[in-house]
């Protein structure tokens, strides 16, 4: 037509060129390759589509994958360029290669693997934290008596408890621990010297050993606190108070007799200054 160029755009030329080369490879495979009946039928169908629609022919990712299996790398690489040119023509923007079915499946499995790995790592962290807390507070021990519905109900307790340190246990289900009364053991969490820390570890280990006895009883008793403050931070840091007996004997007396604790006696609603003589003994 007047005023119009008879030249074909370079993009369309490239599409036709690649389509013709793909058709040539298919014809060559039909002549030379040892094909199964299904492969021959598949190539004939693709060839028919290319001859009918030319550069406008559309092949699915599954069809491209099958072409790659039958023709080898040449067929797929050429058809990928056909797909690239076709995508560029429709988008009017930069050329990109359409992801194949296989590559999409690989990316999907990678994302799933990463997601599952994150879930496993989080679960392991939670499990390690639980195991650490159990070993830090000592093994859970059983005991007997009448159940109390509150951490500050006086009398025998029948829930399991764990040893926190040489003079403190924690009853299962309670918010705060239970301070054993009548004695004080060296601190292992905030010691004033290394000797106190080591002695505190020994006291904790000894209490755990005593708590393995089958004849064990924990009894809640009133704390030496001002009236109305029981159960608050103003009274014993929110902890309840108790007496732990093994074979009828107070564990505090056992630890004192073994040099792992000292007497700590409160009267009424007052307690003396907490005795901590262990570092002074080493100076």
Image (cartoon, rainbow, N blue to C red):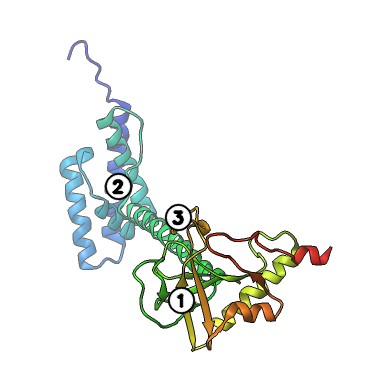
Give the left or right position of residue 138, taking residue 26 as reference. Answer: right
| Mark 3 element type | loop
| Mark 1 element type | strand
Q: Neighbour class for label 3 at 10 Å: few (<14), some, many (≥20)?
A: some
Residue 13 image point, x, y percent = 30, 31
At x 19% / y 56%, what residue is drawn?
44
Q: Residue furthest front?
A: 268
Q: Which residue is mark 3?
A: 229
Q: Nearer the viewer, residue 24 or 110?
A: 110
User: Can residue 165 be spotted in the picture?
Assistant: no
Give the left or right position of residue 172, taking residue 261 as reference. Answer: left
Residue 91 image point, x, y percent = 27, 30
Q: Measure the C-alpha gap from mark 3 to mark 2.
A: 89 Å
Q: Are marks 1 and 3 in contact (CB under 8 Å)?
A: no
Q: Measure the C-alpha gap from mark 1 to mark 3.
A: 20 Å
At x 21% / y 10%, what residue is drawn?
3
Q: Residue furthest top?
A: 3
Q: Which residue is mark 2?
A: 22
Sequence-wise first label, 1 or 3: 1
Residue 205 image point, x, y percent = 62, 77
Q: Measure the C-alpha gap from mark 1 to mark 2.
A: 89 Å
At x 36% / y 30%, what residue is drawn?
94
249, above or below 14, in the image:
below
Q: Which residue is mark 1?
A: 219
Q: Neighbour class for label 1 at 10 Å: few (<14), some, many (≥20)?
A: many
Sequence-wise first label, 3 or 2: 2
Q: Nearer the viewer, residue 17 or 211?
A: 211
Q: Nearer the viewer, residue 272 or 157?
A: 272
169, above or below 80, in the image:
below
150, above or below 253, in the image:
above
């Amino acid at each position: 037509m007047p005023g119009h160029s008879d030249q074909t755009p370079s993009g369309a030329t490239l599409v036709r060129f690649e389509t013709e080369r793909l058709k040539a490879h298919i014809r060559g495979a039909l002549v030379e390759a040892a094909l199964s009946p299904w492969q021959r039928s598949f190539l004939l169908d693709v060839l028919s589509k290319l001859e009918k629609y030319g550069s406008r022919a559309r092949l699915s990712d599954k069809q491209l994958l099958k072409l790659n299996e039958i023709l080898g790398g040449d067929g797929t690489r050429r058809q990928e360029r056909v797909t690239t040119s076709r995508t560029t023509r429709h988008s009017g923007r930069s050329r990109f290669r359409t992801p194949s079915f296989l590559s999409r499946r690989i990316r999907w499995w990678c994302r799933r693997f990463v997601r599952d790995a994150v879930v496993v790592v989080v679960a392991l962290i939670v499990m390690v934290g639980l195991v650490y807390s159990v070993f830090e507070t000592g093994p859970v021990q059983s005991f007997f008596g009448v159940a109390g519905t509150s951490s500050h109900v006086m009398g025998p307790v029948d829930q399991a408890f764990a040893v926190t340190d040489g003079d403190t246990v924690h009853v299962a289900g309670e918010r705060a621990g239970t301070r054993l009364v009548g004695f004080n053991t060296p601190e292992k969490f905030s010691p004033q010297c290394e000797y106190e820390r080591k002695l505190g570890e020994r006291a904790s280990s000894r209490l755990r050993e005593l708590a393995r006895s089958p004849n064990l009883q924990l009894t809640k008793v009133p704390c030496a606190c001002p009236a109305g403050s029981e159960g608050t931070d103003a009274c014993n840091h929110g902890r309840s108070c108790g007496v732990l007996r093994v074979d009828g004997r107070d564990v505090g007396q056992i630890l004192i007799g073994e040099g792992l604790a000292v007497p700590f006696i409160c009267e009424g609603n007052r307690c003396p200054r907490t005795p901590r003589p262990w570092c002074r003994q080493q100076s």
